[in-house]
């Protein structure tokens, strides 16, 4: 009696993930507030997660820094929202980095990537090895999107790219979209421990909002100004220092205001690709389009986030015919 052949699940049932890092930072987000002041905020420390996400692609350090700052900003803003789904930041411009994308789920699954044109990047680097975020992105737009699934309308805000840094660009968005007043500090750098990215965000609580403030408007203005002044003393080294705990850093910044930390939230490696998802995408193409995609007898798709190639035998992917039915073998 011979052994039966091992069962191989078809691609549309294969929900397995590729061999990517399984990293969770239990204290990736530390929410905090200043008691009696119109100020709340979040400290984002990606730790080793930043290195795992950023080293999936071999980019120039300037591009990697931009991607890291965007990841930290995305995590900071996503965790301020009450939603089920995904929050994303996307930048599209005419600069060397023509596409920049990061997203974070309500559960803290974070991912992102930057796509750079080698020739345009080389031309930009001719003016210096440390181009600004604005020089990398060029003219274009930033989109902030909350996507809660196909049955829910997406909420999106789009603004032109304005400012020299990713911090400037985000503050420009808040300024023209009538959001809460915000203050941001973002850093990303390659340290002896690997790439690190972090963000500190302050938000001014609206009158009558949480905190039940009884101070006068002028007192609240002064408290907000004081908080921003204290936050401005933070350095990139402090933001990126793994050995400096969030509580210690917040105390260092705001101890004169009586800072209090809330329950920390986790962030994790958030690429959600699988053969099943990609098969669903491929099945939406026509047989003729699938034939054009084929290299030899296979179709190869690359996940832009984790930079993993998926190979599908052409004979296994049917595709849609003109009448919407599936191609038959």
Image (spheres, rainbow, N blue to C red):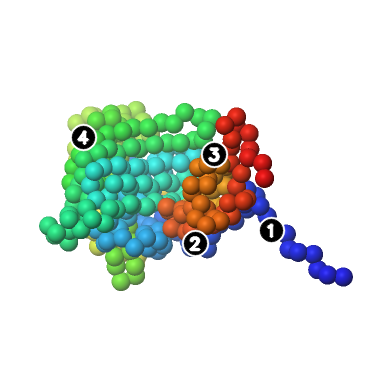
Q: Is residue 266 above or below residue 156?
A: below
Give the total number of marks visible in the rendering: 4
Q: How far apart are marks 1 and 3 (CA)?
A: 25 Å
Which residue is label 1 attached to?
A: 8
Left or right: 242 as drawn, with respect to 264 = left
Going 17% across and 61% down the picture, which residue do you hit? 129
Which residue is label 3 attached to?
A: 286
Under circle 4, the secondary element is helix
- Of the two numbered discs 2 and 4 in the rendering, the one whose residue sits closer to the viewer: 2
Q: How far apart are marks 2 and 4 (CA)?
A: 47 Å
Q: How far apart are marks 3 and 2 (CA)?
A: 31 Å
Residue 221, label in figure: 4
Other-residue count near label 2 (Cα within 10 Å), few / some / many at <14 / 14–19 / ≥20 = some
- Of the two numbered discs 1 and 3 in the rendering, the one whose residue sits closer to the viewer: 3
Classify the position of the N terminus by image quarter: bottom right
Foreground of the two, 234 or 135: 135
Under circle 2, the secondary element is loop
Which residue is label 2 attached to?
A: 20
Whole-percent x, y for residue 95 in the image: 23, 47
Going 42% across and 36% down the picture, which residue do you hit? 146
Which mark sits nearer the N-terminus, 2 or 1? 1
Which mark sits nearer the N-terminus, 1 or 3? 1
């Amino acid at each position: 009696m011979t052994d039966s052949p091992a069962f191989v699940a078809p691609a549309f049932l294969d929900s397995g993930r590729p061999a990517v890092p399984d990293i969770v930072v239990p204290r990736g987000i530390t929410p905090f507030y200043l008691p009696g002041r119109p100020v709340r905020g979040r400290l984002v420390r990606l730790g080793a997660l930043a290195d795992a996400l950023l080293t999936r692609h071999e980019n120039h350090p300037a591009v990697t820094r931009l991607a890291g700052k965007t990841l930290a900003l995305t995590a900071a803003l996503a965790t301020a929202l009450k939603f089920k789904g995904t929050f994303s930041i996307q930048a599209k411009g005419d600069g060397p980095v023509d596409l920049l994308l990061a997203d974070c789920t309500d559960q803290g699954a974070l991912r992102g990537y930057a796509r750079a044109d080698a020739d345009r990047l080389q031309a930009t680097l001719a003016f210096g090895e440390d181009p600004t975020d604005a020089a990398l992105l060029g003219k274009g737009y930033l989109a902030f999107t909350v996507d809660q699934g196909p049955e829910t309308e997406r909420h999106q805000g789009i603004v032109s790219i304005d400012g020299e840094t990713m911090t400037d660009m985000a503050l420009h968005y808040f300024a023209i979209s009538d959001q809460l007043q915000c203050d941001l500090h973002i850093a990303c750098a390659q340290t002896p421990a690997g790439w690190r990215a972090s963000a500190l965000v302050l938000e001014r609580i609206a009158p009558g909002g949480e905190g039940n403030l009884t101070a006068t408007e002028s007192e609240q203005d002064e408290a907000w100004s004081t908080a921003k002044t204290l936050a401005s003393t933070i350095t990139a080294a402090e933001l990126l220092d793994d050995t400096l705990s969030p509580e210690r850093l917040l105390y260092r910044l705001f101890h004169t205001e009586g800072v209090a930390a809330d329950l920390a939230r986790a962030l994790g490696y958030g690429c959600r690709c699988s053969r099943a998802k990609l098969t669903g995408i491929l099945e939406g193409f026509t047989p003729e389009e699938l034939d054009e995609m084929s290299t030899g007898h296979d179709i190869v798709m690359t996940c832009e986030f984790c930079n993993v190639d998926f190979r599908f035998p052409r004979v296994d992917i049917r595709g849609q015919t003109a009448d919407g039915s599936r191609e038959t073998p």
